[in-house]
Image (spheres, helix red, strand yellow):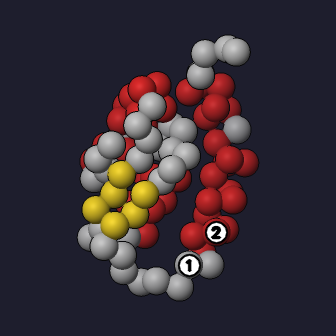
């Protein structure tokens, strides 16, 4: 298996983010205490969660490369992995 490549993953960022946006739009909550992105990738879905629920404790990936990529893209600002 090839190594995970965040640049290649981001090439299709809009297509990969759209399902998370659509699902999140269906969540009726206005606030959350904690949000977890189980499939963070480069952090785009985690960013959606952090922006939607700014007061929530958030966490993203625990696997090294996606986690580094999410932090590098600025997702670390509120997310703790």
Q: Assign a secondary structure to mark 1.
A: loop
Vertical position of residue 43 compared to residue 46: above or below: above
> In percent of the image, x 46 and y 25: which residue is there?
65
In the picture, residue 13 is in which quadrant?
Answer: top right
In the rendered view, tell whether residue 65 sits above or below residue 61. above
Q: Nearer the viewer, residue 57 or 73?
A: 57
Asked if disc 1 and disc 2 are in contact, CB closer than 8 Å, the reply is yes
Residue 45 lies, in percent from the top left, at 52, 53
Crowd rating for badge 2 (residues with CA inside 10 Å; few <14, some 14–19, many 20+)? few
Q: Label for residue 12? A: none
Q: Is residue 13 visible?
A: yes
Q: How many marks?
A: 2
The residue identified by callout 2 is: 23
Instruction: Look at 68% across and 57% down and name the residue there.
Output: 18
The quadrant holding residue 33 is bottom left
* Residue identified by numbered label 1: 27
Image position, residue 52 (x, y; %)? 43, 69
Residue 76 relative to residue 61: left or right: left
Residue at 56% in and 78% down:
27
C-alpha span from label 1 to label 2:
7 Å
The x, y position of residue 7, in whole percent, is: 59, 25
Sort mark 1 into few (<14), some (14-19) or many (20+) by Cα contacts within 10 Å: few
Residue 51 makes an appearance in the image: no
Could you tell me which residue is drawn at 53 percent across and 85 percent down? 28
């Amino acid at each position: 298996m090839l190594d995970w490549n965040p640049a290649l993953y981001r090439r299709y960022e809009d297509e990969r983010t759209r399902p998370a946006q659509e699902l999140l739009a269906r969540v009726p909550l206005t606030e959350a205490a904690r949000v977890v992105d189980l499939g963070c990738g480069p952090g785009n879905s985690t960013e959606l969660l952090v922006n939607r629920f700014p007061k929530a404790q958030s966490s993203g990936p625990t696997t090294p490369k996606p986690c580094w990529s999410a932090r590098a893209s600025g997702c670390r600002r509120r997310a703790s992995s």
